[in-house]
Amino acid sequence: MRIPRPRSLAGQLFAMQVVLVAAIVAGCALFAYLTDRSQAEESARLQSRATAAAAARSPSVVEAVNSADPSAALQPYAESLRRDAGMDFVVIMDPQGRRWTHPEPDRIGRTYLGHIEPALRGRIYSEQYVGTLGLSVRTVAPVYDGGKVVAIVSAGITVDEITQQVREQVTALIVMAGAALALGGVGTYIINARLRRHTHGMNAAELGRMHDYHEAALHAVREGLVMLDGGRRIALANDGARELLGLDEDAVGRHVADLGLPRPLTGALLASEPRVDEVHLSADRVVVVNTQPVVGGEQRGTVVTLRDHTELQALSGELDSERGFTQALRSQAHEAANRLHTVVSLIELGRADEAIVFATAELELAQALTDRVVDAVGEPVLAALLLGKAAQANERGVELVLAADSRIDDGVIPRSLPSRDLVTILGNLIDNAVDAASEAVAGAPAPTAPAADTQAQEDGAQRGDAAAPAPAAPHTRGGRGRVTVTARVENGELLLRVADSGAGVGAADAEQMFHRGWSTHGAGRGLGLALVRQAVHRGRGSILLDHGPDGGAEFTVRLPLHPAEVSA
């Protein structure tokens, strides 16, 4: 047996609205009927009172009452007054209640059916009473002659007449109520047909489940999802998007241009055409942006998906470093083989003493930097990085020197500074410095390193440091390049400084070299310092560009350490 599907939300609302409209119309009709009936009875009472009072004050009535045959004079008068006033009856009687007039002549002379006592006491009195013509609304008034009640006048309208009047009004009311009900039903149907299209015929339970799934999906996916309305305001942003873009809780409803995002990323979000797998930088992340306009006759908004590319980019950088290490080791192995052959040849020639001197000198040169790095840098990741970069630099004819005041004990760097970020910062800075130093040695104009945007000027200004680079010192063709690395802890901060003997950085380039994509090394470069800048930003530190002691550029990075984790 097939279980019937619950009525859709639109259908439920339609049924509820039809019942509600019908109830309102029926209630209004009943209220109008009761009001009209009450007003008709009140109108009949006032009308009968005015007629009875007018007849009681008529001199002709007093004159006829004092005549020998009151009925002969009063019957024509009463009928004429009844027709003119729209009454059902006008009865004139003596003080004992015997009728002198009546719409039905055969009832003249009979006793009046009703209360006349208040009239005998001189008061005009209205009541509902069942008389010879049926239930009626009547008014009884006394007729005075010389201060004495000589007759009584009763004028009234039957309830059947009142009901007939109300029935005519109610008929018109019912027609209007029916028209209102039909109009309300049509309007409700149109509105609910539109609602049915928007809800796709789903009922309230289905919509509720869809909302729950929607909320769960938004919070579950790690990728960022942003929906913009037609005015380029944020209509929805999930947790992933808030994290990747650094959005506040009140971001929904704000225009994209007011979010404080980098200009290229803002331009991608505001673009009217689709964007596919574009790489952009936020404050702390490298994100891959895809946009798709929502179009339905007119542009209604944009759906934006964001993927975190930061870790992948960092891994790519580490892979490049590993490849460099491999090449350096291969080259060193080749050189070691040559030196070993030299030592063996010297021994074969019988010159053992010279072989020992040659081998010892080579060993001392190779071991000197290793001993210096291992002694000064207790952090194993940084020590390994420096040794690997030293080998790479040596293959390119550049000497990598660790400054004498460098000192980082093991365990000093807290968990708040991930090793990956330190590798990103120091590795890219050394690569840039080696590039500059080697190109200066080769006699080429010293290009600056791959670049990205930084907080140098802002953070430098806060520390009182100067950020403007000085002109580069001249270099001699054929000389050996030099890169000096300083790594130490001072004043609760980790200081990393890399200076080179390159041509330095021009003032014009200093403003642009920290923007993503700017590079003098060709297409596909210009991201290294962008990653440095992001890593520094994540560590709540600062990066400063200055003129180095060897004539080239000098980058100084300061990363705050937790006071409890800094050892003296």
Image: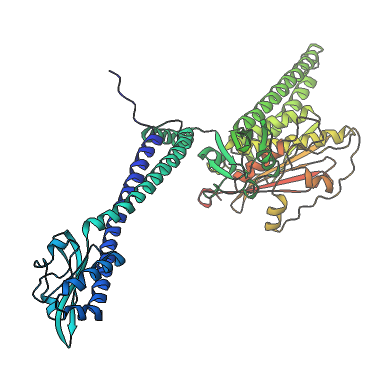
Q: Residue at x 72, y 37 (%)?
A: 430
Q: How is the image coloured?
A: rainbow
Picture coordinates of residue 122, whole percent (x, y): 16, 81
Total residue callouts? 0
Q: Quadrant of the N terminus?
A: top left
| The image quarter in which residue 103 lies | bottom left
Picture coordinates of residue 431, whole percent (x, y): 74, 34
Left or right of 537, for residue 208? left
| The image quarter in which residue 188 lies | top left
Picture coordinates of residue 500, whole percent (x, y): 79, 41
Q: Is residue 48 visible?
A: yes
Left or right of 418, for residue 29? left
Q: Nearer the viewer, residue 533 or 117?
A: 117
Left or right of 388, for residue 90? left
| The image quarter in which residue 246 lies | top right
Q: Nearer the viewer, residue 139 or 271?
A: 139
Q: Residue at x 16, y 75 (%)?
A: 152
Left or right of 453, for residue 202? left
Q: Nearer the viewer, residue 392 or 347?
A: 392
Picture coordinates of residue 347, whole percent (x, y): 78, 14
**Residue most extreme to the top:** 348
Figure check: 175 above or below 110 = above
Q: Nearer the viewer, residue 139 or 397?
A: 139
Figure check: 274 above or below 143 = above
